[in-house]
Image (tube, helix red, strand yellow):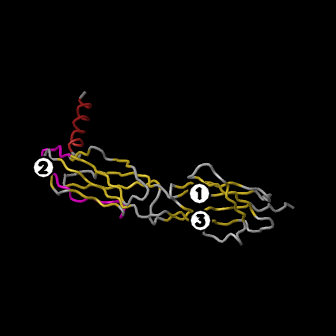
Amino acid sequence: MKALLHSVFGLLPLFCLASQLSFENKSLELPCELGQKEVIAVFPFENKGEEPIAIVHIRSTCGCTVAEWEKKEYAPGEKGEVRAVFTIGDRVGLQRKALEVITDEEDDDTTRLTLSTTIPELGKVRPAVVLWDSDHEGVEKRVRLITHPGVRWKILDPLVSFPFRIREIKSEKKDQIYLGITPKSGSSVPRAKLRFQFTNDEGMSETKNLHLLVKTPSSPKD
């Protein structure tokens, strides 16, 4: 019994050292629309301690994310908020950004705030890699281009000398284009990269790559 009490009282100081700057949520997942310039996450908090707490510094894990807060010191019971402003730039796909809040509390652990969002792409190429066996003559494989409404696409590489034959296949879906791709007869090029450019009327532009690979025949064993 004495050992148990000793263990319990030994843990009390650890609980007392926990931060009294209490955040409603430490992790937020926010939506993002095509063409959006920035994503702003708001993290409300309250000083639940009996002493004033000062935010000494908020460190960002990425230069694209900036922290904003109203003032330095918060009285007991006072509420405030930390804003994480994430500038999108040319980033696409899933993004996770973090802020580390440092206060003047004695022996306080850093509080980590996380913002997650998925930035939509103008266009996608699926699959991004297409592979043919060595006996590839006449074998056509399909690639799908997925776009947002109003997005235009084009192939950046000259197709006259390209070692693969490409044709567009009609699709009933307006946001999807299918391409049939076949290695040209007699071509000895085992691999190639096809570049697609996606653009819209707002001046946005993205380039996506499609990698085409043909297996080379295995050398006969002696």
Amino acid identity at mark 1:
Val
* Span shown in magenta: 46-63
Distance from Cα at disc 3 to Cα at disc 1: 12 Å
Between 160 and 93, the one lying in front of the other is 160
Q: CA distance from mark 2 to mark 1?
A: 54 Å
**What's the residue at 36%, 61% (across, down)?**
87
In this rendering, which labeled residue sits more in front, label 2 or label 3?
Answer: 3
Q: Residue at x 25, y 56 (%)?
A: 102
Position in image of residue 138 (x %, y %): 79, 58
Compared with 209, 42 (above or below) is: above
**Which type of secondary structure does the marked residue at label 2 adopt?**
loop
Is residue 105 toward the left or the right of residue 193 in the image? left
Tell me what residue is drawn at x 44 percent, y 52 percent: 118
The answer to whether 133 appears left or right of 212 in the picture is: right
User: Of the residues under marks 2 and 3, which one precedes in the sequence?
Assistant: 2
Q: Quadrant of residue 20?
A: top left
Q: Earlier in the sequence, mark 3 or mark 1?
A: 1
Label 2 vs label 1, nearer the camera: 1
- Whether residue 49 appears in magenta in the rendering, the answer is yes
Name the one closer to the observer, 87 or 9. 87
In this rendering, the label closer to the viewer, 3 or 1: 3
Residue 29 screen position, x and y as percent? 38, 48
Q: Which mark is residue 75?
A: 2
**Secondary structure under the numbered disc 1 in the rendered image:** strand
Label 1 environment density (alpha carbons within 10 Å; few <14, some 14–19, many ≥20): some
Residue 176 painted magenta? no
Whichever of callouts 2 and 1 sits on the residue coming sooner in the sequence is 2
Amino acid bearing label 3: Lys
Q: Quadrant of the N terminus?
A: top left
User: Which residue is label 3 attached to?
Assistant: 154
